[in-house]
Image: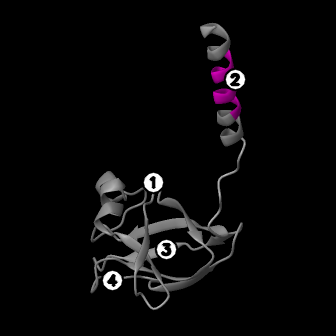
Amino acid sequence: MMKPCFIVLLTLSLAVLGGCLGRPMQQTGDVGYLEGRVSIGPLCPVERSPPEPACTPSLETYHAWPIGVWTAGRERQVASIEPDENGAYRVGLPAGTYTVDLVKPGRFGGNLPATVTITGNETTLLDITIDTGIR
């Protein structure tokens, strides 16, 4: 008697679990991407070609110049841009208009702040240039 009950219970459990696994995750809206490359420089008073290793951006360099993505009007920060060791980045954002700017105010900015419009299921390109002010 115990064995048939166990089989019925196991079958029902697997059916319920299978039904849950088959459901797609609910989307909260269209998501698009902001993608590009961050360039920071100069890092030394005299730039040489090829550059000296100390004058080439590293992950630490990118972390020292944090970049944020805010709602239009810079009311609320919604994301951070975190470049890889080559300066490349990609951030997923809900469709809308955003302001991209340095997190720490009063620093040189190159082409920041920038206004970008993200469209669902598309990629918006923004290459960011940060002027360090070193001369």
The residues bearing labels 1 and 4 have C-alpha atoms spaced at a distance of 21 Å
Apparent side of residue 37 relative to residue 62 in the rendered image (left or right): right
First-in-chain label (1 vs 2): 2
Q: Which mark is residue 111?
A: none
Type of residue at label 2?
Thr
Which of the two residues, 78 or 13, is positioned nearer the viewer here?
13
Residue 45 image point, x, y percent: 27, 71
Residue at (32% x, 61% y) in the render: 63
Type of residue at label 3?
Ile
Type of residue at label 1?
Asp
Q: Which residues are magenta?
A: 7-15
First-in-chain label (2 vs 4): 2
Residue 49 image point, x, y percent: 42, 60
The residues bearing labels 1 and 2 have C-alpha atoms spaced at a distance of 48 Å
Eye-nearest disc, 1 or 2: 2
Eye-nearest disc, 2 or 4: 2
Q: The residue tagged with tag 1: helix, strand or loop?
A: loop
The reply to whether the C-beta atoms of the residues labelled 3 and 4 are less than 8 Å apart is no
Q: Residues within 10 Å of mark 4 (few under 14, many from 20)?
A: some
Q: Check the image and report above or below for 37 versus 111.
A: above
First-in-chain label (2 vs 3): 2
The residues bearing labels 1 and 3 have C-alpha atoms spaced at a distance of 14 Å
Q: The residue tagged with tag 3: helix, strand or loop?
A: strand
Q: Check the image and report above or below for 87 versus 2.
A: below
Residue labelled with disc 1: 84
The reply to whether the C-beta atoms of the residues labelled 2 and 3 are less than 8 Å apart is no
Q: Which mark is residue 128?
A: 3
